Structure formats: structure tokens, C-alpha cells
């Protein structure tokens, strides 16, 4: 046990982000990126990761939205990651970017149903499970640096979202693509994967190298979960 630290109680007031505050913060983040630096990815403990993000309406004009999305894409690829939600840059808006074009082995691709996912942007996304099939694998989060944990998720989902032009899309995803979509969309309602993880499966990255099999069978035995 450690000594109690001074805690500021989160009130409704401190949890409220005005549209003006959001726009100013977006401009601040974009300017960090456009000046040649990578804006930091906020880590667990930052309240924005636990807030309900606002639906994107007209908080940003289309030019600012484009610059924010380009910044998010660059931060995701630089991390590197397969998705990034706006709250991870401290922006409480329901916006995320996704892309998974990383090389993987045939075996991992088959077991984890990991199909390449071309870059796309999701605004105000929602998802729901199709059927009862689930998939249980390790995943990690750029806002919970240095750890991996096992999460059971619906394997097949129906989604809807807007693109940056405001066009509505409805699309189904399966396997790893469905996992990425769920992980990023969960961020927009203040949920991080650790909330859904089997906590006994948690691994620091340098221990995770023990459990890199495509499935979780060995980790399950080794870590007793
Ligand atoms: Zn994440």
C-alpha cells in the first residue's frame, strides 16, 4: 500500500467540455503536429479517457476536421498502432481512425482472423454483435502503454458510422477487424480494454514474448486464467 495521494474529485463541472474548449484544444494539438512534433497520446489516469465523448456535430469546420484526422492518422502510424480514438489525443469527440496493414504470419492471420484493414475514419460510430460467436485474444492499447491483456469480444459485428464528408455507412466486420472497431468505439464512451479484460491475463510487454502463440491456450495454463 502506498500513502494516500491528494485527489481532486471529478465533478460534473470539471467533466464538461464546451465546444469552444474542444475547438481550441484541437487547434493546439494540430499545431503541435504541423510544427513537426508528435502530440502525446494520453495515458490511463487522464479523465478524458473516462469521459463520454460528444457526438461530432459542428464543433469543427471541415478544414479543421481534416487536419485533426490527418494528425490522428500520423500519430497512429507513428506509435505504431492499428487504431486511434480522438480522446487518446485529449479530444472528447466521437471520432477515430483505423488501419491494419501490418505484416503477420499466415498462422496468426488464420487463427486470429486478421485480414488487412485499409485506412478509414469513423465518426459517431456504433456497433452491435451479430449472433453469439466470440473471439478471445490478447490486445493492447496505446493509452495503457507497456501491457497486453486478453479480451473476449463478439467476433462478428454490425456497425454504422459517418465519414468525414458526413456520408453514412453501414458495414459488418469480423475477426480482428471487428476487434479493432470495437476497441476504438469503446474509447468514445470512456471504456478502455482493461475494463473488459481477464485481469489475470495481463502481461507487461517484455513478459508477453512468452505468449506469442496465435491463440491463448498456453497463456491460459501458464497464468491460470
Ligand atoms: Zn486503445
Image (cartoon, rainbow, N blue to C red):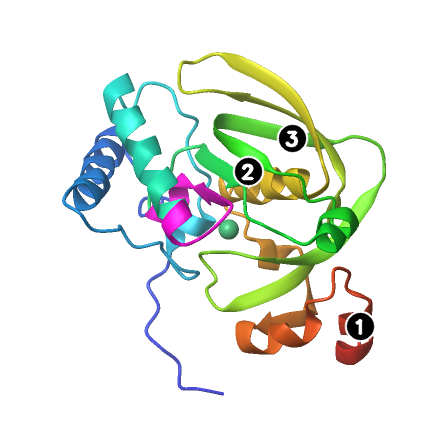
Judged from the image, the secondary structure of the residue bearing numbered disc 3 is strand
Q: Would you name the residue on which mark 1 appears?
A: 218
Q: Would you name the residue on which mark 2 appears?
A: 185
Residue interval drawn in magenta: 77-89
Q: Residue 127 — which label? A: 3
Work out whether residue 106 or residue 14 is closer to the camera in this orientation and state it. 106
Q: Is residue 18 above or below residue 170?
A: below
Q: How far apart, in angstroms, are the residues tagged by discs 3 and 2? A: 8 Å
Judge left or right: residue 127 versus residue 186: right
- Residue 38 covered by magenta stretch: no
Q: Mark 1, residues whose alpha carbon is within 10 Å: few (<14), some, or many (≥20)? A: some
Of badges 1 and 2, the one in the foreground is: 1
Q: Residue at x 46, y 20 (%)?
A: 163
Judged from the image, the secondary structure of the residue bearing numbered disc 1 is helix
Q: Earlier in the sequence, mark 1 or mark 3?
A: 3
Say if disc 3 is inside 8 Å of ligand 1: no
Q: Are marks 1 and 3 in contact (CB under 8 Å)?
A: no
Judged from the image, the secondary structure of the residue bearing numbered disc 2 is helix
Q: Residue at x 18, y 41 (%)?
A: 28
Horizontal and vertical percent for residue 198? 71, 64
Q: How far apart, in angstroms, are the residues tagged by discs 1 and 3? A: 31 Å
Using the rendered view, name the quadrant where residue 19 is placed: top left
Q: Is residue 11 visible?
A: no
Q: Are marks 1 and 2 in contact (CB under 8 Å)?
A: no
Q: Are marks 3 and 2 in contact (CB under 8 Å)?
A: yes
Q: Where the C terminus falls, by quadrant?
A: bottom right
Of badges 1 and 3, the one in the foreground is: 1
Horizontal and vertical percent for residue 77? 41, 46
Amino acid at each position: 500500500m502506498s500513502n494516500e495521494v491528494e485527489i481532486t474529485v471529478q465533478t460534473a463541472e470539471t467533466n464538461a467540455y464546451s465546444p469552444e474548449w474542444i475547438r481550441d484544444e484541437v487547434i493546439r494539438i494540430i499545431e503541435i503536429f504541423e510544427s513537426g512534433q508528435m502530440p502525446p497520446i494520453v495515458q490511463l489516469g487522464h479523465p478524458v479517457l473516462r469521459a463520454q465523448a460528444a457526438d461530432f456535430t459542428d464543433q469543427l469546420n471541415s478544414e479543421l476536421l481534416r487536419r485533426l484526422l490527418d494528425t490522428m492518422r500520423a500519430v497512429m502510424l507513428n506509435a505504431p498502432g492499428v487504431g486511434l480514438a480522438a480522446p487518446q489525443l485529449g479530444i472528447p469527440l466521437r471520432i477515430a481512425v483505423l488501419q491494419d496493414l501490418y505484416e503477420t504470419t499466415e498462422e496468426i492471420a488464420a487463427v486470429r482472423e486478421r485480414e488487412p484493414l485499409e485506412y478509414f475514419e469513423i465518426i459517431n460510430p456504433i456497433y452491435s454483435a451479430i449472433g453469439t460467436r466470440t473471439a478471445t485474444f490478447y490486445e493492447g492499447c496505446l493509452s495503457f502503454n507497456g501491457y497486453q491483456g486478453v479480451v473476449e469480444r463478439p467476433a462478428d459485428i454490425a456497425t454504422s458510422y459517418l465519414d468525414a464528408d458526413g456520408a453514412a455507412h453501414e458495414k459488418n466486420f469480423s475477426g480482428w477487424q471487428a476487434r479493432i472497431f470495437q476497441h476504438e468505439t469503446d474509447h468514445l464512451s470512456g471504456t478502455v480494454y482493461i475494463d473488459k479484460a481477464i485481469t489475470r491475463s495481463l502481461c507487461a510487454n517484455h513478459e508477453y514474448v512468452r505468449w506469442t502463440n496465435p491463440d491463448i491456450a498456453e497463456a491460459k495454463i501458464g497464468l491460470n486464467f
